[in-house]
Image: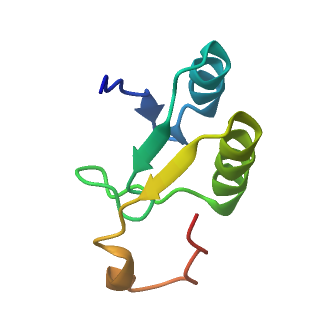
Amino acid sequence: ARIDGINGGPDGLDLDQVERELKRGGVKAIYLTPNFANPTGYTMPLAQRIRLVELSQRHGCAIIEDDPYGQLRFSGAAIPSL
């Protein structure tokens, strides 16, 4: 398997880069921690989750969601899983 990283920043995962990689082909799965990602603590907003799911469906790519911290939410409503 070849593993490539996707850039992230204060607004989360670079979904434009994800889309470019998917269009190039060969991507079989996307692995991510959308809730309280370590080390930043970032949580992926619902709109980004929806776009990521749409991209993965369009390109036939699986999403592997790792959620070890999902139960640690102290405030705010839970965001649906991918």
In the rendered view, tell whether residue 44 sits above or below residue 71.
above
* Residue at 44% in and 33% down: 8
Relative image position of residue 49 (x, y in whole percent): 63, 55
Which one is nearer the viewer's eye here, 31 or 72? Answer: 31
- Of residues 60 and 35, which is closer to you in this image? 60
Give the residue furthest to the left: 39
Q: Where does the image place residue 66, in percent across and percent down from the top left?
A: 36, 62
Say which quarter of the image contains residue 69: bottom left
Left or right, 21 with respect to 39, comes to right
Q: Name the residue located 68 percent from the left edge and 19 percent from the top edge.
A: 23
Above or below residue 53? Residue 60 is above
Quadrant, the C terminus = bottom right
Residue 55 in the image: state x and y as whole percent: 71, 40
Left or right relative to 55: residue 31: left
Q: Residue at x 43, y 27 (%)?
A: 7
Furthest residue to the top? 24
Q: Quadrant of the N terminus?
A: top left
Within the image, what quadrant is residue 77 found in? bottom right
**In this rendering, would 38 be left or right of 58?**
left
Nearer to the camera, 25 or 14 = 25
